[in-house]
Image (cartoon, rainbow, N blue to C red):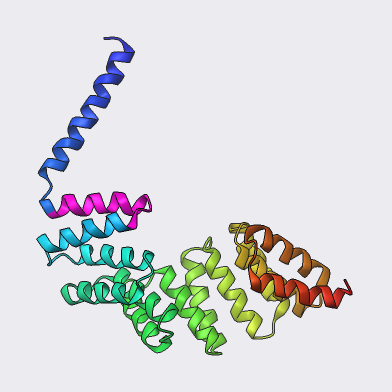
Amino acid sequence: MSKTLKIVYFFIGLILLWVTYTYLLSPEAREANKGMGFYQNGDYYKALVCFEQAIRINSKNPDYFLQLGLTLYKLKQPQAALQAYDRALAINPGLPQIWFNRGVVLMKHNHDFKGALACYDRALKIDPQLVPALNNKGLILALQGKNQKALEMYSRALKIDPQSALAWAGKSFAVYRSGKYPQALEDINQALTIEPENSQFWLARAKTLIALKQYQAAWIGCQKALQLNPGNLEIIQLQKTISVKLGK
């Protein structure tokens, strides 16, 4: 048998396997799989239809409500997403990802820090190594002025995942709020080593450099942030402030 024919048979086998797998799936699982495909391609409206259909067929599967919540969040419907997460947790309260997602909505859209912290605590009780929950809990604690407790969260996160850029950036933020600017600069530099194209990290670095009175370096940092995020008003305003300091 020629090499070309072997390759053809291999792909035919893959297609047959996929068709068989799809056929054996339950109707709701087929809808959910279609929804996942649409979601991954960024077609959230079509994904929404699929997940809603999967739930109509089987309303006892918390994963379908999780995917529904994620899709609604992408469609900028955070309160509807929250309801979907609540329905998932009513079925199975032992899923840490859903507690985490619920906390994100409460933190970012409802500004309910107390409720968000409770969600992150529930998620971490189930999965103590859930780094995103540690990072978000650290951020809330830093915003509340509880910098030492925030640093404990980021230290835990970095022990689990030393390559978590958000943990390094969060640690920098908590240290910055403690007035330890040289250490804050080291930490945000570490975050940028991991994610050099993150405009928010460059902005944080510029703010830290201003605190250190390194205005020229801060101006250059703002320029880099603007290249990555053109038109961002916060960055533009900060650069204007630095320009005044430099006499430009």
Is 119 situated left or right of 23 in this image? right
In the rendered image, residue 74, in percent from the top left (x then y), is placed at: 38, 64
Tell me: residue 162, above or below residue 79. above
Residue 193 shows in this picture:
yes
At horizontal 78% and vertical 68% (from top left) the residue drawn is: 219
Main secondary structure along the magenta-highlighted residues:
helix
In the rendered image, residue 52, in percent from the top left (x then y), is placed at: 20, 62
Can you tell which quarter of the image residue 236 is in? bottom right
Farthest residue in the top direction? 1
Tell me: residue 216, above or below residue 109. above
At horizontal 63% and vertical 57% (from top left) the residue drawn is: 196
Asked if residue 30 is among those painted magenta in the image, a careful observer would answer yes
88 or 150, which lies in front?
88
Is 9 situated left or right of 205 in this image? left
Quadrant of the image containing the N terminus? top left
How many marks are shown on the rendered structure? 0
Is 126 situated left or right of 59 in this image? right
At horizontal 16% and vertical 40% (from top left) the residue drawn is: 21
Tell me: residue 86, above or below residue 200. below
Quadrant of the image containing the C terminus? bottom right
In the rendered image, residue 120, in percent from the top left (x then y), is placed at: 37, 78
At horizontal 42% and vertical 79% (from top left) the residue drawn is: 109
Residue numbers of the magenta segment: 28-44
110 or 211, which lies in front?
110
In the rendered image, residue 58, in percent from the top left (x then y), is placed at: 11, 62
Farthest residue in the right direction? 247
Asked if residue 125 is among those painted magenta in the image, a careful observer would answer no
146 or 129, which lies in front?
146
Residue 187 shows in this picture:
no
